Amino acid sequence: MNTRIIPVNYNYLAPTTLAEALTVLADKPRVKILAGGTDLIVKLKTGVDIPLEYLMDIKRIEELKLPKYCQRGLFIGPLATLSQLEKDPDLQKHYPALAEALRAMAAVSVRNMATMAGNLCNASPVADTAGPAICYGAQLKLENITNHRIIKAEDFFTGPQTNVMTPQEILTEIFLPQPLANCGGAFRKKTRVKADIAKISATAVLAREGNIITHCRIAMGSIAAVPLFLGELSAGLIGQEMSPDLRREAGRKAAETIKPIDDNRTTAGYRTAIAGLLVEEVLAAAWQRAGGEL
Amino acid sequence: MSEQETVYKIIGKATPRIDGPAKVTGKMQYTSDIMLPGMLYGMVLRSPHAHAEIISIDTAEAEALGAVCLTYADINPIVYNERSVSIPAATYRDRTVLPAKARHFGEPIAAVAAASEELAYQALQLLKVEYKVLPAVFTPQEAMADGAPQLYEQIWLGEEKVAVKNNIGVIRNIEEGDVEAGFAAADRIFEHTFELGRVYHDQLETKGAVCAPEADGSLTVWCTAQSIHANRQLLGRVLGLPLSKINVKKLPLGGAFGSSIQVNTVTPICACLALKAGRPVKLISSREEDFYSHQKYPSVFEVKLGVAGEGRFTAAQVKCLVDFGAHQVQPLPYMGCVAGWFASLYRYGPLRFLGTAVYTNKVPCCAMQGYGNPQINFAIESMVDIICEEMGWDSVEFRLKNHRGVGDEFWGQGPTIRSIIKSCGVPESLTKGGEIFAWKERRPHTEKSGRYRKGIGVARGFHTSGTGGPKEGEVIDYSSCMVKINEDGSVDLISALMDHGGGTWDAMAKIVSQTLQVPMRMIGLSPTDTRNTGYDVCTHATRGVYCGGAAVLYVTNKVKEKLLEYAGRILFEHPAALEIICDEELGQGVIFAKNYHQKSITIGEVAKIAQINSWGTIAYTDSYRQRNCPPCFTTHFLEVEVDTLTGEITVPKALLYGDCGTVINPVLIDGQLIGSFNRGLGYTVYESLDVDQKTGELTNKGLLVDYKTPTAAEMPAAENVLVHWTDTYEPSGPFGAKGIGEAALASVQAALANAVYNAIGIRFAKLPITPEVVLAALRAIDN
């Protein structure tokens, strides 16, 4: 390993239209899509075994660039960088959990390069934007040369570094539906230092009527083989009255659900020890953002 | 204060860095910026095994690709130590340019040079090495066990062959006074064990070299170095060339923290590659290679301290166990220094130090910011807190009563380099620091509750300024320079003294400027090399300003004598009747007849007349050794906040109190204190280097992504970092100055641990104190 060298020979392609890019994917074997490159290039340099014949840089495809907010919700193009999204006023206003996740990610120079689509497609169990995507009910549009399909964020991840995409597909759009009325969301993560990959993260998005939870989605990162949607726990909270006991109980259940491992960032034991606390915190913060009182 | 000092005083002023513009515009030329026509790129093959015989290396395929290959068969197998700061009789030698046996994961085994880095990388993959893998040892306990795999059968101490038994590299025991009687006289004896692991220097610039064979048979070398002369001497020995044929250039260094006191491992490899290729070769370590180059010494201390009822020590004993890795860079002097830092902290009465340093199949350790001082300071300053807590003594009062101060002996570089302390800011920093931090209002941890708990901690430390002593000891210490007044009154300063980025060269220019009363902009720092400078041991041991500066002051005063003699000749005055006053507007030092300023001449005019009249150039060159090693003291008062639900530690407020004698540049002193506080925060709370116990590979694989150091985001808010300096004057220092660099780190660790204790009542005796460790300890109490 030498991090000044990418030790593989590959062909570099830079299409300027989506059609061209999809044709490449349809025609050529072992193509890797390069957007921000903050994961892919690092993996290539550190010797991760990635079959690579063609590196297809999609940064010149204008139609994949901008985030767009409308009545239906927010459409995020696959080339929207984390910095760009972090500064987007519509995103900040309507999707605060995602805004928090974006702000908590990496250092400025990395956020200027990295894309949210790349963060999702890289399919790390740690991906910070995955939790908010799951909790806001994001729909991911996957296109190939002939067809497209829509996949829910929680169904997108299949294992560490793997997802449902075929080698012929591009993630062309992340759609976040308009949040419900009286809705709030929050994201928290624990790291070694501020600019770091999470030891553990939690996201909650909920809506309320009075003191009753009417909608709830909780997700956690870096505690299982995929970014985890805690569906059963979320569903169980709907219809309940918000209280410190309820949050504590939710945290306890979350800690029982997760299956963390030891790695270079922390231990399985530490992850389990603070998982409940994080869930309690995001539930409280989301509730307050929904206009609820603690 | 003399009249001239009131007129022009550059010492103590915040002046812009001379090298600032070059640095911020990227024009500074570091080793990795050197490009030469026809240059090849070198790359190193590193061992994938922690311990293995190298049976054979097949270079045919790599050579077929056009690469020049270097293996053990190509090198002069002379056995050396990369470090030459200690005298030869106190230096163990155990290594060659490339080894016949791999002794740690990541050890250089072979090297290639090719027309591009990519080609070199390809060639590296084509080298075929046959290893015979041997069992490895990763802990000192394993290594010392009978029947454990042996790294060496024999090594050299000076010119003597020494057998290695049970992998023990160094035993160093030091005893002063009747220790048993001291403990017998104690009312209470405290015993605790402290453990500090390995961390990485993480200097900005990775180690590297560019070597160019010249037509006259000489070799020109550009390399990362804290001493160009050390590099020249070692290369001369390894290459069998006269020193006059080896020219090492002085370059700016992108940080060091001690990592280039010794000759970097890659430099002789690069030189051998260049000579074999007959072309210039550039070899720059990648960051992950740099992780496998050198690391900080880990240490385990068993501390035993006796105290008597009135608040005094009666005796002290430290057992120290060090795992220094696969090669000796300097564990022998390390042990001596640790003993010295230990001995010099307090007036214990009788003391004993028992040190054992052991070979393991890990990366070799070398000096890093404090050379054992932060390690032993953590143990002793934690112990002081433990003792005071238990005995009901105020720990600030206890420190004031027992610290070594003016008139006491200080061991600046182990037991053979001792001098008497002549300046000491400890009382001021403890007393005033205590007032600033409201020490007396500190509440015990038993009165604290809730999720977030704050605590205040104090610790004090020091480092030496240089390694000079009244008597020559185990350590070489002197600097050389030349000062030359040009024919327009500007001045050239020619010296081999290195600047690691801390501003040492600026300090030298200021000393010349102050002494000759020549404005800073008229002082030139000459690019130099080993051919046109006298020996300078190394910029290490916080000696740059105190020792290097003293040499510059000494030589500048000699030049001043000559200048005034010539001026006296011209003005028909006795030199003693003349004085120099800087005229900043004119850009000249002006020489006046004392008390009769109608009679004057500029330095430029004197130099010009001397030249026209063929009197000669007004210049002087010499070497100079300091005969003291005064401690520069620091005191840290720190406030921490512990999140008892996550175990996270933050530092809301810090008071960094430094004693560097006269301040040469206040901004740079602040920078040293704040920067070192940041490093101490990393050492205490964040950083550790671990190896896979099966393979010996670093668990972070040498990648910074898994070696986190605190950034500005982890520091207290800027307005809550309070920096103070004591009002002290070191009589033996240039203009009263001492050092500060390494002292600035010494007491950070203990102050943090003491503050954590004050917050949550848990004593952490092992670093780092990560959230995982804190939370586990809190839960253990709850259960």
Image (cartoon, rainbow, N blue to C red):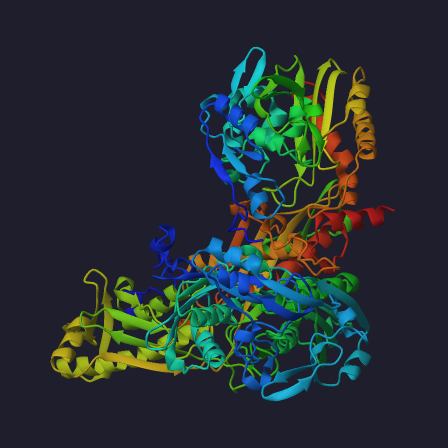
Quick one: which residue is furthest to the top in this view? A71
The front one of B495 and B678 is B495
- Image location (x, y in percent) of residue A48: 62, 45
Quarter of the figure with residue B752:
bottom right
Quarter of the figure with residue B103:
bottom right
The front one of B411 and B64 is B64
Left or right, residue B131 beside residue B577 = right
- Image location (x, y in percent) of residue A207: 70, 16
**Quadrant of the image for the N terminus of chain B?**
bottom left
Q: In the picture shown, does residue A192 fall above or below A145?
A: below
Quick one: which residue is furthest to the left in this view? B612
- Judge whether residue B140 can be spotted in this image: yes
Q: In the picture shown, does residue A88 fall above or below A114?
A: above
How many circles with numbers are drawn on the protein? 0
The front one of B37 and B155 is B37
The front one of A189 and B718 is A189
Left or right, residue B456 beside residue B159 = right
Quick one: which residue is furthest to the right in this view? B783
- Judge whether residue B256 can be spotted in this image: no
Left or right, residue B723 beside residue B296 = left
Q: In the picture shown, does residue B315 fall above or below A172?
A: below
- Image location (x, y in percent) of residue B17: 36, 58
- Image location (x, y in percent) of residue A291: 67, 18
